[in-house]
Amino acid sequence: MKTIKYIALSTLLLTASSCGNDWLNIEPSTQVQTESAIQILSDIEFTLNGIYSSMQDAYSYSGRMTYYGDVTGDDVQANGSTKRTGSYYLFKFTKDNAPSTHWSTSYSIIQNCNMILTHIDNMDAKDKEAYRDDLKGQALTLRALALFDLTRIFGYPYMKDNGASLGVPIVKDLSTINSKPTRSTVADCYKEVISDLTTAIPLLSEKFVKGKINKWASMTLLSRVYLYKGANAEALATAEEAIKGAKKNKYELWTNEEYATAWGNDSEAGKQGEVLFEIVNLTVDGPGKESMGYLCSSSGYSDMALTTSFYKLLNEDPKDVRNKAYKLYKSKDGKTVNAYINKYQPQGNENIADANIPVLRLSELYLNAAEAAVKLDDNTNAVNYLDPIVKRANPAKTVVGQTITLNQVLTERRKELYGEGHRMFDALRNNQRIERKDVSGTGLTIKHLTMADEAKSFDWNYYKVVFPIPKKEMDVNTNLIQNPGY
Ligand code: CA
């Protein structure tokens, strides 16, 4: 239904420029609507639904945007060099052949959010102020999410140089064909992301609405952004408030018993579980075979799998329930044994390609809080927030009475969030190395593929940990500076 609505919207409305905007590389289905189109609040909601719909694309959050941070790390690898994730995993992209979609899908989201944000304050809400505020909060959060993801893909980690290196252009007005924005620093991008989120949070609804951003989702993203920035006191305070608020509004960590299958739950108000924001894919508007569901499944493309080293780490404790979030696959001849991520489970009778994509989970909030607390030498809170995650994984375990270390929290984070797009970013923002080494004795047959030495072991100094600015964009916008090394 969402797709149909969105197509109706884009055909209904004239586009700003018939030939589109080259530097934005906006696809026809997400082209800019004329300014006169947005007149009443229902039009705003219509446009917002179109943005959510565009995020279902496999080049956006249903696929590439999600697996990027996993296959560039050490816990998940491509299951062959010609797989869709192969060139990401092998760091084979150059400035000439790297995909342009990380850029274009994100700027398309930003452009459509700007469309809403340039109008919404001037609209007469007529006793519907809360509705208007909520729509504005959603648009601000989605713009922040897109800018944050652009910044972490194209810019070096904030902690490397306090944000002095180049991030991406900050676009707040409606772009035209003549727009040739320059790249802002990573620090300025973070400032903008934080400004949008802190403006959004008081405006947003506290209630669950399926597939939509609410206050707790927005705060989860903000706590993540603060953590990436090393603003640990703010990260802790934001995560704490969000955990309290989310629980008051009936969000709960999945239980140990629920964990293996909760990924396939079709959440509803009152039974929303722990997913604070998800991309809802349906069979009628599914992202197709390039989606996480299909890529991760042995009945699909078997595109990526757990590395032997990560499998060994998870199996330190065979009773850890997170061993149920992958599926062991054995070929009939017994020659192939792989562990495939099983977090992208379809809802009801859907196809595997239509699995929803959890983007922000309550578990992350606990881990954000625990990590920030460790960094603040606040062991009480580190224990408070790490323990529910540890206990849920194996009820026989606890960290109560322990002095929590940063490595302990980060290891727990790896175990909890694998396959959800975090690992490379989490390691690098903490100035840790990614080491891609096989270990023996796991029973798995997968091995790291042949790759350049520089891709086997690297830290935030490796030039390829930031993506090249797409050639398409460089060609049309002479103000853009390419990332160093490319
Ligand atoms: Ca679904």
Image (tube, rainbow, N blue to C red):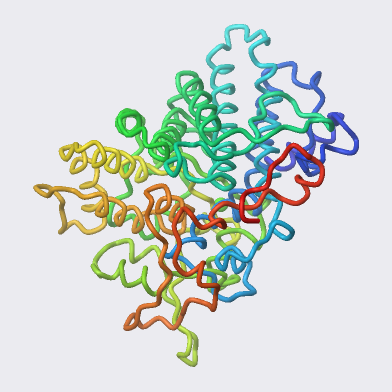
Whole-percent x, y for residue 180 in the image? 77, 33
Residue 388 in the image, given as x and y percentages of width and height: 23, 46
| Residue under the image location 43 percent in, 73 percent down | 339
Q: Quadrant of residue 150?
A: top right
User: Is residue 311 left or right of 344 when viewed as pictured?
Assistant: left
Give how far across and how far down residue 139 sits, in percent.
Answer: 60, 27
Residue at far left of view? 401
Question: Which residue lies most toward the right here?
Answer: 18
Residue 103 lies in what quarter of the image? top right
Total count of labels: 0
Quarter of the figure that contains the C terminus: bottom right
Towards the viewer: 454 or 63: 454
Q: Above or below — where is 194 with respect to 264?
A: above
- In the image, residue 406 above or below residue 368: below
Q: Of residues 291 and 304, which is closer to you in this image?
A: 304
Question: What residue appears at the point 46 percent right and 53 percent down from the top-left corner?
Answer: 460
Q: In this view, does 26 lie above or below 77?
A: above
Residue 115 position within the rendered picture, expressed as x and y whole percent measured from the top left: 71, 25
123 sits left or right of 186 in the view:
right
Q: Would you say 219 lies left or right of 140 here?
A: left
Who is closer to the viewer here, 275 or 474?
474
Quadrant housing residue 45: top right
Q: In which quarter of the image is the N terminus?
A: top right
Q: Which residue is drawn at 58% across and 36% down?
A: 147
